[in-house]
Amino acid sequence: MIGQRFGRLTVIAESPKRGHHKQWRSRCDCGGETVSFEFSLKSGRAKSCGCLKIEGLVQRSRRGPVKTAHKMSFSSEYRIWINMRQRCSNPANSRWYSYGGRGITVCDRWDQSFEAFIQDMGLRPTIEHSLDRIENNGPYSPDNCRWATATEQQNNTGRWIKSVLIEGKDYTLREIAARTGLTVNGAAERVRRGVVGVDLLKPRRKARG
């Protein structure tokens, strides 16, 4: 079985049996991994790590056809989105015990739409950046995520920005982003640069030309 392809899956190792049924660990073309029964692979029931189903959900989203679904299906952002959902919802995922297994979830907005994820997070700034949860025990959601380098993640103490007081009112990063036209990351960067008060709510400057 090792090395054989079934849909998007390539078998990479044998996994412990469940009852009398053999199981195999496979790597998906999207970069994710999953464990499937041998009979599911051979019958064609198991074709991917779950990304095929996710793509179908994206395309059937209430927002209508999602343009980014077919233009970014091989991008690192799309792979990160799929892996995020897998480790939080699929017990067969190798990292599930550190995420879904201890209660880490994905917010409904991101769980249902890759387009919404990109709208909130923006594109990955560089290949050195990965998706980071600000509060380590919190969910994957616009208010609790940023693109961060390994160094920035190491400096994350779990007490990062949750809200900012502006003229007597608490604003979340998402609210600041909505007021300014910035991404949540962009709003967080303003706070990190020391911008305070109403200056945090100034609209994003439009590029010239």
Image (cartoon, rainbow, N blue to C red):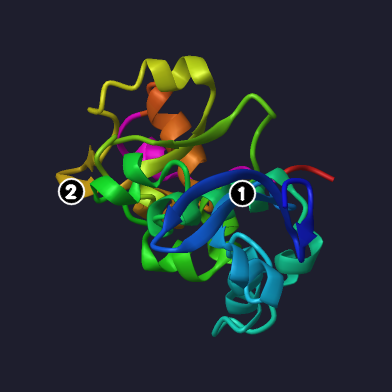
Residue found 58% across the figure and 77% down from its top:
57
Q: Secondary structure at mark 2?
A: strand
Instruction: Write the start and end of the magenta stretch as one range.
Output: 196-206
- For badge 2, the amino acid type reads Lys
Residue 92 on the magenta span: no
Q: Is residue 161 above or below residue 180?
A: above
Going by the image, does 200 lie left or right of 34? left
Density class for disc 2 (Cα within 10 Å; few <14, some 14-19, many ≥20) is few
Location of residue 145 in the rendering, given as x and y in whole percent from the top left corner: 41, 42
Residue found 54% across the figure and 85% down from its top:
62
In front: 196, or 120? 120
Residue found 60% across the figure and 71% down from its top:
40
- In this view of the protein, can residue 31 be seen by the observer? yes
Q: Is residue 192 above or below residue 172?
A: above
Location of residue 179 in the rendering, given as x and y in whole percent from the top left corner: 43, 55
Residue 198 on the magenta span: yes
CA gap, disc 1 to disc 2? 42 Å
Location of residue 162 in the rendering, given as x and y in whole percent from the top left corner: 25, 40
From the image, tell me which residue sits under label 1. Answer: 32
Check the picture and name the quadrant holding the C terminus.
top right
Considering every residue shown, the one lying at the far front of the view is: 20
- In this view of the protein, can residue 203 be seen by the observer? no
Q: Is residue 118 above or below residue 199?
A: below
Residue found 20% across the figure and 47% down from its top:
170
Location of residue 110 in the rendering, given as x and y in whole percent from the top left corner: 47, 62
Label number found at residue 169: 2
Q: Earlier in the sequence, mark 1 or mark 2?
A: 1
Q: Is residue 128 above or below residue 12?
A: above
